[in-house]
Image (cartoon, coloured by chain):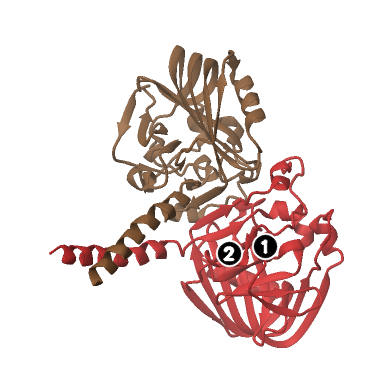
Chain colours: A red, B brown
Amino acid sequence: MKRVGFIFLLLLILLVSPVMASAEREVVYQTSTIDALLAGLYDGKVSLAALKQHGDFGLGTFDRLDGEMVMLEDDIYQITADGAVHLMTSGTTPFAAVTFFDKDRSAAIGREKSFAELTAYLDRIIATKNRFYAIRIDGYFKYIKARSVPAQSKPYPKLVEVTAHQTVFEFTDIKGTLVGLRCPYYVKGVNVPGYHFHFISDDRKRGGHVLDCVIERGLAMLDETSQFHLFLPKDTVFDAMDFEADGPGDLKKVE
Amino acid sequence: MKRVGFIFLLLLILLVSPVMASAEREVVYQTSTIDALLAGLYDGKVSLAALKQHGDFGLGTFDRLDGEMVMLEDDIYQITADGAVHLMTSGTTPFAAVTFFDKDRSAAIGREKSFAELTAYLDRIIATKNRFYAIRIDGYFKYIKARSVPAQSKPYPKLVEVTAHQTVFEFTDIKGTLVGLRCPYYVKGVNVPGYHFHFISDDRKRGGHVLDCVIERGLAMLDETSQFHLFLPKDTVFDAMDFEADGPGDLKKVE
C-alpha cells in the first residue's frame, strides 16, 4: 500500500510539473533595460545558457555590444559587424528579450510589401497595441537593409555614437526569417515601443538588425504574450545611472 | 530496490521544489498598469487568492476602486472610504503590486521625521534608485494623513476625478505600519516612480493611502528586488486603450 501511495504521489507531481512549466512560456523575459543599453552598458551580465532557460526566440546583443543577436528555434546566432553569422554556444549578453514561441495566429503575406506596409499590416492583424507580441516572419525578401555593430572598448561610448558608425548590409532576393518583438508604448525606457526586428537568412549566413526591407511573400506568425518579466542583473554601473536626468534617450536615432 | 529509487526521486523533488519556489520570491509582481488605473479601468480581474500566490506584502486597490489595499504578513486589508478596515478573504483587484517580503536591511528611525524627511532618509539608505524596493516601516506616528476612495459605478470616471472627491483621514499618535514600494523612474506609465505608501494601524482599525505623515520613531525594513513581473489580465477595455495619445497621465494629481 505504501508503494502505491508513493507511485500516486510521484505521478501527481509528474502530471502537475509540466502544467506549472507551461505557464512560464507566455512571458517576455528581458535582461536589463533599453535605456541602460542606450547609455552604454554593454558588459555581458547574463549567460546565453541562462537566457535559454527563458525562451527559444528573441533578440538582443552580446558582451561589449559585439553584434546583433537572433534567437530562433532555441539556437542563438551572433551577426558580427563583418557580416559573419556565428552559432553561439557560450558567451553573455547585456540586453536581450526572449520568449518561448507558441504561435497564436498566422497570416500569409501574398503581396509585396515595403517595411512600412509590413508593419501597418501587422498593426491590423494584432488584437491590441497594449500587449507583447513575438513575431516570426518566414519569407522571401526582395531587399533587406540590416546593420550590425562592432565590439566596443571601455570607456564605452553611448549607443547613438556606435550606430553612427554601424556597418550596413544590403541583401537582395534572399530567403530568411524576421525575428521580432512588438512592445506596448508604456514600456518606453524599458524596451523599444513598437516593432523591432532582426533578420537571419535561411542558410544562416546573413543577418542583422533590420533597418529596411521589401518582402515579396511569406508567412507571419504571432505569439501574443500578456506577461513581461524584467530581470536586472547585479551591476554597480547600472545602479549608479541617473535615467531620469538623461531624459528620453536617443532611441529614435539608433533604430 | 525499486522502492528505494522512488523514495530517492521523491526526496529529490521535495528538496528541489522549495529552491525553485524561493527563486520566485525576489520579484515584484504587478497586475495591470498605473496608466490603466488612471484611465479608469477599475474592474477587478485578478482574485485576491491568485494575488497571494505572488506575494505576502504589497499594495493596490479592489474591484470598482473600492478602497485602498494593504497586504501585510500574507493578510489583505481593505480600507474603505468610510474609514473601516476589512480583512479580505475573497474578492478581486484591478491593480496591485506585491512581493514576498524578505528583509535585506533595516534601519532604526530614532528621531522625528516629516514625510519628506522620511523619504529623503530612505533615499540615503537604499543602494540604488534603479531597482525595486519593498519597504516596511513599523513605527509610532505623531501624524498620518491618509485617504481612501469609494467604489465607482460605470461608466467609470478617471482616477483624477475620483481623488478630487476622496475621503481624507487624519490620525494622531498612532502605532502602525507603512507598507510601501519604491519603483525606478523608468517604469513610469507601468507603476508609480518613487515612493508609494499605504498605512495600517497596529490594531488593524485605521489606514489608507498615505498623503502625509510625521514619524516619531520606528524601524524601516527594506527588501531590494531585482525582478519585476507584469501580468496583463484578459481585458478588452485595456486592449482598446490608447495610452500613447493619453499622454503622461494624471499621476501627480492623484498621489
Q: In the image, what residue type sits under mark 1?
A: Thr
Mark 2 neighbour density, 10 Å: few (under 14) some (14–19) many (20 or more): many
Of the numbered discs 1 and 2, the one sitting upstream in the chain is 2
Residue closest to the eye, B39 or A73:
A73
Quarter holding the C terminus of chain A is: bottom right
Whether residue B46 is situated above or below residue A99 in the rendered picture = above
Q: Residue at x 36, y 67 (%)?
A: A18
Residue type highlighted by circle 2: Leu
| Chain of residue at mark 1 | A
**A70, above or below B42, in the image:** below
Q: Residue lying at the far right in this picture: please name it.
A: A165
* Label 1 SS: strand
Q: Is residue B149 left or right of residue A111?
A: left
Image quarter where the N terminus of chain A lies is: bottom left
Residue B90 in view, yes or no: yes
Determine which of the numbered discs, if any, sits on residue A51 in the image: 2
Which chain does the numbered disc 2 sit on? A
Q: Which label is found at residue A206?
A: none
Coordinates of residue A62 in the picture (x, y in percent): 71, 65
Please tell me in which quadrant of the rendered image residue A58 appears.
Answer: bottom right
Tell me: A115 left or right of B99. right
Residue A252, horizontal then vertical, whole percent: 76, 58
Q: Secondary structure at mark 2?
A: helix
B136, B199: nearer the viewer: B136
CB atoms of marks 1 and 2 within 8 Å: yes
Q: Residue furthest left?
A: A1
Where residue B15 appears, as percent x and y from the top left, is: 37, 55
Q: Which residue is mark 1?
A: A93
